[in-house]
Amino acid sequence: MALLLDLANIVGGFLLAAALLRLLPRVGDDLDRLAGRAAPVAWIVGLVALVTGGYYLIVHLVSGPRVFHFEVVGIGVGLALLWSRLTGRQEPRTEQPGGATGVRLLLAIFGLIAIVVGIQGLFTSDG
């Protein structure tokens, strides 16, 4: 279950950070195409992140030892990816001429943080 949370953080972070990653010099276009292909299933990644993050949050609140940042970031990734489905509002526009600005930039930075937290979770023991 912890592996699902870590993978959801990595993949969800990638989907959120796509607005910044497309600005990378040589690989930006390829990463943008990959994010475009994965975008239709982003709600599944968001659901997995939300459920696993919520599960671990409840487990660590009830039986300890403490709340970890992995589950908080997972819940944030899940909410960010499911935002349009939960509220019925449109997502922030990704096709902006000047790159990522405003809310889209904030989500992209959070996505980069989620990627780092997911990688850290892969190398952190569960016990």
Image: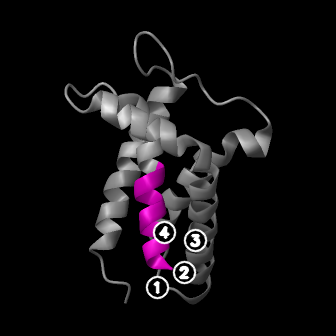
Displayed quadrant of residue 29: top left
Q: Find residue 23 and report its horizontal and vertical position in percent.
A: 30, 24
Q: Earlier in the sequence, mark 4 or mark 2?
A: 4
Residue receiving disc 4: 5
**Element on which disc 2 rests:** helix
Displayed quadrant of residue 127: bottom left
Q: Earlier in the sequence, mark 4 or mark 1?
A: 4
- The kind of residue on which mark 1 rests is Pro
Residue receiving disc 3: 52
Mark 2 residue crowding within 10 angstroms, few (<14) / some (14–19) / many (20+): some
Mark 3 residue crowding within 10 angstroms, few (<14) / some (14–19) / many (20+): many
Q: Earlier in the sequence, mark 1 or mark 3?
A: 3
Q: Earlier in the sequence, mark 4 or mark 3?
A: 4
Tell me if 78 is positioned left or right of 8 in this view: right
- The kind of residue on which mark 4 rests is Leu
Which residue is at 50% across, 22% downward? 102
* Magenta range: 1-12
Q: CA distance from mark 2 to mark 3?
A: 12 Å
Residue receiving disc 1: 65
